[in-house]
């Protein structure tokens, strides 16, 4: 599974927390209902 990622890593809870903080830190109303895939480039087929 890791050979399909761009950096050979699984997504960790720390990765998820950092992304959540990134979104929380933005002081804009422009991001409404957007999504961001935090997967190191891996996806299920």
Image (cartoon, rainbow, N blue to C red):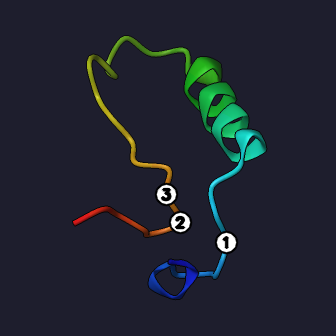
The percent coordinates of residue 40 (x first, y second) are: 53, 66
Q: How many marks?
A: 3
Distance from disc 1 to disc 2, alpha carbons, whole Å, reads 7 Å
Name the element at disc 1: loop
Q: Are marks 1 and 2 in contact (CB under 8 Å)?
A: yes
Q: What residue sits right under mark 3 in the picture?
A: 39
Ranked by sequence position, the earlier of labels 3 and 1 is: 1
Q: Is residue 21 above or below residue 3?
A: above
Ranked by sequence position, the earlier of labels 1 and 2 is: 1
The percent coordinates of residue 38 (x first, y second) are: 50, 50
Which residue does the image show at 71% across and 38% down from the upper left? 18
Name the element at disc 3: loop
Distance from disc 3 to disc 1, alpha carbons, whole Å, reads 9 Å
Name the element at disc 2: loop
The percent coordinates of residue 37 (x first, y second) are: 40, 48
**Residue 4 picture quarter:** bottom left
Q: Are marks 2 and 3 in contact (CB under 8 Å)?
A: yes
**Residue 43 picture quarter:** bottom left
Image disc number at residue 40: 2
Q: What residue sits right under mark 1 in the picture?
A: 9
Q: Is residue 15 above or below residue 24?
A: below
Q: In the visual, does 23 lie left or right of 18? A: left
Nearer to the camera, 13 or 17: 13
């Amino acid at each position: 599974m890791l050979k399909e990622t761009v950096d050979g890593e699984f997504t960790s809870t720390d990765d998820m927390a950092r992304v959540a903080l990134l979104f929380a830190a933005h002081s804009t109303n422009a991001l409404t209902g957007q999504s961001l895939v935090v997967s190191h480039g891996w996806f299920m087929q």
